[in-house]
Each structure stands twice: as structure tokens, then as C-alpha cells.
Image: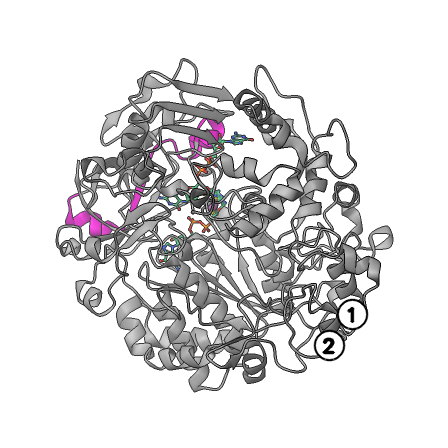
Amino acid sequence: MANTWGYGAMTNSLGDIQNAKAIIIFGANPAVNHPVGFQHFLKAKERNNAKIIVVDPVFTKTAAKADHFCRIRPGTDIPFMYGMLNLIFKNGWHDEKFISDRVYGMEDIMEEAKKWTPEKVEDITGVPADKLIQITRLYAQSTPGTLIWAMGLTQHSNGSSNTRLAPILQLALGNLGKEGGGTNILRGHDNVQGATDMGCLSDTLPGYYGLSDGSWKYFAKSWGVDYEWLKGRFKSGKWMNAKGFTLARWWAGVLDGKNGNDKITNAETNLKALFVMGNGITSIAQQAKVKEGLDNLEMLVLCDPFVNEAAILTDKQDDVFILPAATQFETSGTVVATNRSAQWRNKVIEPMYESRTDHDILFDLAKRLGFYEQYTAGMKIKENKKEFTWPEDATDEIARIVKTIGLTGWTAKRIKKHQENWHMFDQISGRGYGEMKGEYYGLPWPSWTETHSGSPILYNIDRSVKDGGMGFRNRFGLEHDGQDLLAGTGSAPKNSANKNGYPEITRDNIEKVLGITLTEDEKSRIGKNWKVDTSNIIAEKCMEQGMAPYGNAKARAKVWTFPDQIPMHREPLHSPRQDLVKKYPSFDDKKNHFRVDTLYKTKQNEKDWSKEFPINMVTARLVNMNGAGMENRASKYLAALTPEMFCNINPDLAGMHGIRDGAMMWIHSPEGTKIKVKAKYSHAVSEDRIWLPFHFTGHFQGEDLTHKYPEGTKPYATGESANTVTNYGYDIITQIPETKGGLCRIELA
Ligand SMILES: Nc1nc2c(c(=O)[nH]1)N[C@H]1C(S)=C(S)[C@@H](COP(=O)(O)OP(=O)(O)OC[C@H]3O[C@@H](n4cnc5c(=O)[nH]c(N)nc54)[C@H](O)[C@@H]3O)O[C@H]1N2
Ligand SMILES: Nc1nc2c(c(=O)[nH]1)N[C@H]1C(S)=C(S)[C@@H](COP(=O)(O)OP(=O)(O)OC[C@H]3O[C@@H](n4cnc5c(=O)[nH]c(N)nc54)[C@H](O)[C@@H]3O)O[C@H]1N2
Ligand SMILES: [Mo]
């Protein structure tokens, strides 16, 4: 199962952060989680005297390097950002021309922002009004400013609104499409960007093509398989276009409404088998439910270089298979970095012992399930080969098919050449020299054609399209509610033949919009639109005219198909402020949300959770551990740094409960679950909240499960998983769990 926690990508790059004059960081701790990338932040400070502002519920190592720290209550970033927008509009710090030419729906944002005075923001977020005024002035007046976010914004029931309002803030200031500006989302795993780009998501095909007959037919043709055959793999055509379960909620699919669990809509059956490839499982919220899900499976397959600790958590005895997977050092191919650039990797050693690479395991699985030929056909089509070469032909297949994010330029040959010429690229801009002139390192997508430079800064109209420039994508029609959705006159990329906004390019409009005439031969070969044009004539012609195949439109501040058309504050499902829950309630419950009926208001209103569970709980990361943590806890030296699970707690809060530094304490959750962990006094957290790392497992609700590790596999550090006490709550659009907000009760153990 691939990882699907984050969405989005950097508009700019880590190197480009060195061009920023101000850096505002919401819910990210790069000093710990992106320590190499964080050096660019520090260089911005050295080079430009860039000011760093950190907005976080706890004082982090990143905050220690910042000029300003705003201690925000978890789940209240929307009031905070509207508070900034309130001051920006009131003082005229916004970029009026940028907004009128390139943004749709900002009037509604301006209206909403009026409500969020600094005093009101202080009451809700806990950040003093004068601090908000101080940092807003500083940020708005130091342009360009870059806005950074990561998991502190996404892991909330309202997380998708957070990740909409953050770019809106940048749009208001005209900070998008600029060097040193942008919204720079620090992504997670090695190649998580590539995993999402390749469609390891339950609601898209590769390249974010939507689930529709049209997309499936395009892929069937491009893969060289029969569309009807593909359809036959599903119970019926209906399920082909239905979103699947998510990583966060697969267990609900197994439990199928049993024991009061959420009901599902899934082709008249529950899930019976789980195949895990590259996920720790103990990193998923609500571990008691995860355990119940694991226990009720008919078959569990764990494909991992380590013993996946799901095998330790479950009581299931039969039909649990552990397949030894090789690591990234034992295979080769492309990965995608957080700034959308591709990198070629060489194998360092052959797979050790009996381990096999992931692709090898998948190919073998496909053989035994009887669809190996179809599975691999796409790699042989282009040159009509009998056998494919791995991984080059896979890379070239991706380049041939994925148009939506512009991967046409990503041929194996080009990406390899970049890797071989690392020294020929500028570290900040990514611009190539000498032999690599005219290309940016890793060809950050979109790279529209086989000779295109790559696009290091999205939506930048100061550059020509050939040199990575572009406007915003035209994706949602030409107008809405009588308002033009195309970009205003004069806001086309440099050297564009068409100086106005223009629609996405199709076979029918290309001659008119580009002002060209196609030959009869071109007309016979061109695809219906830029997204399915395997001839690539549309993109080639667009390059000649300096135009982007996806159009030049306005960015949307308002999404008319979402439950909240503009981002609105909604209290977390488990909020310490019951008074605010009435004013800012969560969403209506959502039926069939990725196949699971998901609770919002019902859960929030079940009772005043804050009475019994008055303390806010934040879960996050340690520098010496990663994700579920097995990879690091199995290392003697990394484990020694944090040998056991702990809770950062303010001495005043601990004192009120008679908990001494180093004593064991219980943490109880509204789910009725509990964990026993060591108290660690810390002034980084205030008295109303605690902080937990989520990298441990091996103990469950006070019970030591470590006798269950197969001989010789017990890691050096084990402990309770924070996820045993993370609360119910899932994002309304993406279904990311609310692991960055929630409540708990503590006591001395
Ligand atoms: N060492 C190490 N590095 C890693 C990882 C790892 O496990 N270990 N994991 C990788 C992965 S997969 C990812 S996704 C990234 C994640 O990188 P980050 O997002 O930086 O990771 P976290 O530490 O989980 O969370 C960041 C911050 O969000 C804050 N936060 C919590 N709630 C809120 C809130 O409501 N508002 C605001 N503004 N902030 C909030 C937390 O206090 C925390 O300091 O790191 C990657 N890098
Ligand atoms: N409470 C709380 N929970 C969280 C988060 C949080 O902030 N708070 N953050 C969430 C986020 S953003 C993420 S990304 C997840 C991370 O959680 P996981 O994705 O579970 O994290 P990892 O430990 O990186 O898991 C990867 C697994 O893949 C295995 N592996 C490594 N290399 C390979 C390989 O080449 N092939 C195969 N087959 N396996 C491999 C590792 O041994 C490990 O078991 O946790 C999420 N859970
Ligand atoms: Mo992640």
C-alpha cells in the first residue's frame, strides 16, 4: 500500500528559498524533518536578512532559529490566516493588479477577512493581537515572501481548507509565480511526490487523470490493453469510476459496520485481504481500530525490508506472510523530489539474501494472478519490442502517457544525463550550464516536450513557456456566475503570441487560439486535447507560440463544488473550546466518503469532550526516527538517542497531576483507548497541551507485545504508539486523519 498522506508540491524549490526576503512557516518543522533543505532557509537569512516566522502549537527547533514564533492552538490556522488577510486588505498591502488579472473569487475572501480582527483571532488562536499585527506587517512588506507548510496544516478534519487558504494568502500578496515566493510544501517520504504523481491514490489514475470512462479509455489505449478487459477486472463499470478506500480507513472496509464501526459502500463485500508494500501500518491513526481490522482479515501480506510491526500488533496467527523486500539501494530508476524534479538512481548493490525488489515481487504477483502480459504491455508498445528493459522502458512509458502534469520531457535518457552532470547545474536556480544549458536540474514538471527545459517555478509569467514560464491552468470552464475565468490581458507569460488569457488547448480550438494553421498530416495525428495528445503536436505548437498547453486562466479562491466554497473556520471534532464549537461547527456527516460513512457533526456533538478530556494533543516527529520508526529503532545508534516512548509535558501541567519528570503516565483518549509513556518535562509545550512522537510501537495499551517479534528482529527501542490515542476525525476532502488535533486526559501511572 503506498503512502497518500500529503497532497500538493512545491511551486518553487528548496534552493529558491534562498531568494526569499521573508519566510512564514505553518505547521512544519524543517530543522528536524528536512534538515538538509533547512540550510537553504538559513542561507536566506544570511544572504537577504530574510525574516523567519514560525506558526506552531509548540516551540520547535525551527522556531529556535526564527525571528518570530506564534504559538497557535491546534486547528486554528484559518482564523490566523484570515487575521493576516484582514490586516493586509485594510492596510492596502495586497497586490491589486495581480488579484484582478489572475485570481477569481477574491471578493468573497475580502468579505470573510473583515470579520477576523486581531482581537478575535487572539481569542480563538491564542496568538496575541499585537504579535499578529507585527508579523503581518513584516511579512507583507518583505517581498518576495515564501510560505511553507507541511503536516501541521493537513492533518485536520478541516485540513483541505487550510491548504486552500495558505495559497490564497500568497495570491493576495502577489507572491505566487515569483522567485523567492510561492507556496512551498515540504513533502514527506523519499519519492512521495512520485508516488502521488503515479496515482498511488484511491481517487486518481496516474498523472491525476480523474476516474472516468474517458481516462480509462485513454490509459487502456496507451497501455495496449483492451478497455473491456480492464472493465472486466471490476465487479461492474460503476466501481471502476468510484473512489477506493484510503490508507487511513482500510480497516473500516474490513469491519464493514460491525461492532458499531462506520458503514461502508463497497460492491456488496467487505475487504478480506491486505497487501502492504512500504507502509508501517502502525503509523495510521486509531490503532485499536487498525488492530481490529488486522485481526479480522483473511489474509495479510507484508512486503518490507524489515518485520513490519503490523505483524506484532495483530493477534492473527494464520495466513500472515512477510515478504522480504529489497531497499532503494538495491534497485534503480527514477524518483521525484519535493520540487517536482526527477532524479535517476543507480543500484548500489544487488538485493541481499533472499530479498527481492518491489517491482520483481509485483511482476511475480501479476504472473500468478494471470495478467502479467497486460501489466507489462505498455513498456513494449513504443518500439514494438518483444521484451522490455527495466527500468528504462517504464520511465519512457510514463513520459509517453502522462500529459496532465507534463512528463513528456522525462525520458530515461535525459534524466540519466542530468544525474551524470550534477556539477553542471546552479544550486539555487537549478539552471544548467555548458552541455546542460537550457535545462533545469531534474526537469521539474511540467516538462512539456522532449526538449523542454522543465519548470522550476510554477505560474511564473516573467519567463517564457519555453524557459519554464506559465500562467494558471484553465481547468474549470471559461466563466462562472458571469465572471471570466481566464487571465486578464497582459498577464500571459513572456514572449507569448497570445497576450491574453486563453483556454486549454484542444484539437478544435488550436488554430484559433494559437493563430496557426495545421497541415493535413498534423490534423490526422493530433489528439482530442492536450491531455490525451500522444502525438504531442499540441505541446510542440504551443512551445513555438510561447503558450502553455493547459491554458492561461485565473487561480480560484472560491471552489463552488466544495462544502465550503471559500475556506471557513471549523473547530476540530474534539475541541477544547466548546463555546466555539457552537459558533464554528464541523461539517455535516459525509456518507460514502471514500466508501466509508464518516462522522463530523455527530462526533463533535456527541458530548462536551473537553470536560473529560481537557488537554490538547499534538503528535509529530523526531530527527532520528522516520514514520512508523522500525527502520530506525532497529539501528542501535539511532535508537540510543530516544530509547523509549515519551511525552513532552510542561512541568506546571505535570505538577498538577503529580507527575514527576521521568515518571510513567497514562494518556487516555476519547476513543476509550490509553497508552502508558514516560513523562519528559519540557517548556516547549504550554500547560494546555502535550506533545507526542508517533514513531514507536511494540506496546499496546499498557501491554508489552515484544515477545511476538520473530527471533532476532526485535528493535532496540519499542514502546506505545501515539496513534493508539489519536482521535477519530478525517479531512472532509482528502480523508487525512486529524492526528494534529485532538484531546486527551492524563494521570500518573
Ligand atoms: N526525521 C524525520 N524526518 C521526516 C519524517 C520523519 O518521520 N522523521 N517524515 C517525513 C514525512 S513522511 C513528512 S510528511 C514530513 C513532515 O514534516 P512536518 O510536517 O514538519 O512534520 P511534523 O513534525 O509531524 O509536524 C510539523 C509541525 O506541525 C505542528 N502542528 C501541529 N498541529 C498544528 C496546527 O494545528 N497548526 C500549525 N500551524 N502547526 C501544527 C507540530 O507541532 C509540528 O511542529 O517529514 C518528513 N521528514
Ligand atoms: N500520529 C501521527 N501519525 C502519523 C503522522 C503524524 O504526524 N502523526 N504522519 C503521517 C505521515 S505524513 C506519514 S507519511 C506516515 C508515515 O508512516 P509510514 O509510511 O508507515 O512510515 P515508514 O516507517 O516510512 O514506513 C515505510 C515502511 O516501508 C518500509 N520500506 C522502506 N523501504 C522500502 C522499500 O524499498 N520497499 C518496501 N516494500 N518497503 C520499504 C519500511 O521498513 C517501513 O516499514 O505516518 C503518518 N502517521
Ligand atoms: Mo508524510
Amino acid type of the residue that numbered disc 2 sits on in the rendered structure: Asn
Question: Taking 718 as reference, is 215 above or below it?
Answer: below
Q: Which residue is mark 2?
A: 498
Picture coordinates of residue 336, whole percent (x, y): 62, 46
Instruction: Name the quarter where the C terminus is drawn.
Output: top left
Q: Amino acid at mark 1?
A: Gln
Q: Is residue 288 visible?
A: yes
Q: Please rate how many residues cluster around mark 2, counting C-alpha atoms within 10 Å: few if below 14, some from 14 to 19, many from 20.
A: some
- Circle number at residue 545: 1
Residue at the image position 41 percent from the left and 79 percent from the top = 108
Give the magenta-colored segment's residue range: 630-658
Residue 601, given in percent of the width and then of the height, sits at: 22, 58
Q: Is residue 55 visible?
A: no
Residue at image coords 30%, 32%: 293
Query: Is 207 positioned to the left or the right of 444 in the image?
Result: left
Q: Position of residue 45 (x, y in %)?
A: 58, 64
Question: Residue drawn 77% across and 31% down?
Answer: 385
399 is higher (above) or lower (below) than 309 = below
The residue depicted at 28 percent of the width and 38 percent of the height is 724
Residue 563 drawn in magenta: no
- Does the numbered disc 2 mark a residue whose Cβ is under 8 Å from ligand 1? no
Query: Going from the N terminus, do you reach mark 1 or mark 2 first?
Result: 2
Asked whether 649 falls inside the magenta stretch, the response is yes
Q: Residue furthest right?
A: 434
Front-lying residue, 466 or 522: 522
Image quarter for residue 157? bottom left
Decide which of 550, 306 is in the foreground and name it: 550
Q: Secondary structure at mark 2?
A: loop
Q: Residue furthest top?
A: 711
Q: Quadrant of residue 292?
A: top left
Q: Position of residue 544 (x, y in %)?
A: 81, 66
Tell me, yes or no, whether the two marked residues, 1 and 2, touch with CB atoms within 8 Å: yes
